[in-house]
Amino acid sequence: MTPLYDFMSSARKSLDMTMYELSDPTAEQILMADHKRGVQVRILLDRDYSGASVNQAAYAALSGAGVPVAWANDSEIFHQKTITIDGDESAIMTGNLTPQYYATTRDFVVMDSQPADVAAIESVFAKDWAGAAPSPGLPGIDLVWSPGSEEPLVAAIGSAAHSVVVENEEMDSTSIESALESDAERHVDVTVVMTADSDWDAAFSQLESDGVHVVLYPDTASALYIHAKVIDVDGTKGFIGSENFSTASLDYNRELGLVTSAPAVLGPLNSALSGDIANGQLQGRASAPVPAPTTPATAAAPPATSPAAAGCTPIDDEGGCYEPGEYCRDDDHGSTGRSGNGQAITCEDENGTWYWEA
């Protein structure tokens, strides 16, 4: 969570958040601190389903500190989990800000700084903040919104030539299940990775009978819980978002995800899915091999570079490189250095807050 906390703390002008569940005291303190130093903070919380109870304490704490916070329209579930900073970059998440689950739950966050995507996210946020019921959102470059997720996700699954791996919390969409089965029937290697739940047993059985590999984790406190909502197509294209495989989530809720072919996303995604497949239990045909996501050379994660090798200075408290826009430590005020890509940076004062500037 440290990168996400750092992202939230980096806001200079604005922070807009839509969150299904917020009960993270650290996140709440960051939001209060952002507000206190003049950042325009707006927090939109779900009130339908479990939102009213889970989010009540955060709503009270934030509003009590003067942070603008609002309940989303309760005609549908606002299941979206997105944070946008300064109108420049958005964190699109599969998980909620609920710290009791961080250590044991599979989730992903993808950072999106494409201007058309961020502008679309902010446009939809403005409507939702004003109290509107969920309606289809602007597509940007590669965004997938609910209402309206079913068609693009079915199309993504159907576009596979070699392999499909999905992780999800629910399996209650006839269209998604049919798309997975159709892939398997045309000899695409299809793998579903989920946490066992009797509600989905019939779906699992049908998927298995049509040739889909079903890999499950037990629903126990010690096992990894699959909460992620991802689709990996041929190891070269991935969907990451808040959408569960259910009619409500795809057709009615407010949800947001994106489809990307960025190697920096696909490399880590493929690696995580491969590990989850290997560590889960294949159902039915226990002896059959389960293929890992295809990972072409173009989708490989770039090799790690040490701060020393990168030539950056000073080194931050976590052993990494500072980049323009990040906070400076007190000891670095007025000093100069180099970022991870060799760019000259200076620790400068901006209205009482010190940042590294190029």
Image (tube, rainbow, N blue to C red):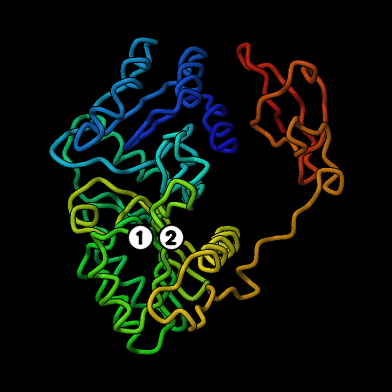
Q: Residue furthest bottom?
A: 186
Q: Amino acid at mark 2?
A: Tyr
**Residue 173, located in which quarter of the rendered image?**
bottom left
- Residue 217 is labelled as 2
In the displayed structure image, the side of residue 19 where residue 100 appears, left or right: right
Please name the residue shown 45% across and 35% down the image.
100
Q: Nearest the camera: 186 or 217?
A: 217
Please name the residue shown 44% across and 82% down the image.
189
Q: Nearest the camera: 208 or 55?
A: 208
Is residue 216 depicted above or below 191 in this figure? Answer: above
Q: Split into 4 quadrants, where in the image is the C terminus?
A: top right
- Residue 301 is labelled as none
Residue that label 1 marks: 196
Q: Amino acid at mark 1?
A: Ala
In the displayed structure image, the side of residue 51 where residue 339 appears, left or right: right
Q: Position of residue 313 (x, y in %)?
A: 83, 35
Please name the residue shown 59% across and 73% down the image.
295
Q: Position of residue 284 (x, y in %)?
A: 38, 78
Considering the numbered disc 1 on the image, is that residue within a helix, a strand or a loop? loop
Q: Nearest the camera: 293 or 301?
A: 293
Considering the numbered disc 2 on the image, is that residue within a helix, a strand or a loop? strand
Is residue 241 depicted above or below 13 in this figure? Answer: below
Q: Split into 4 quadrants, where in the image is the N terminus?
A: top right
Asked whether residue 172 is in view, the answer is yes
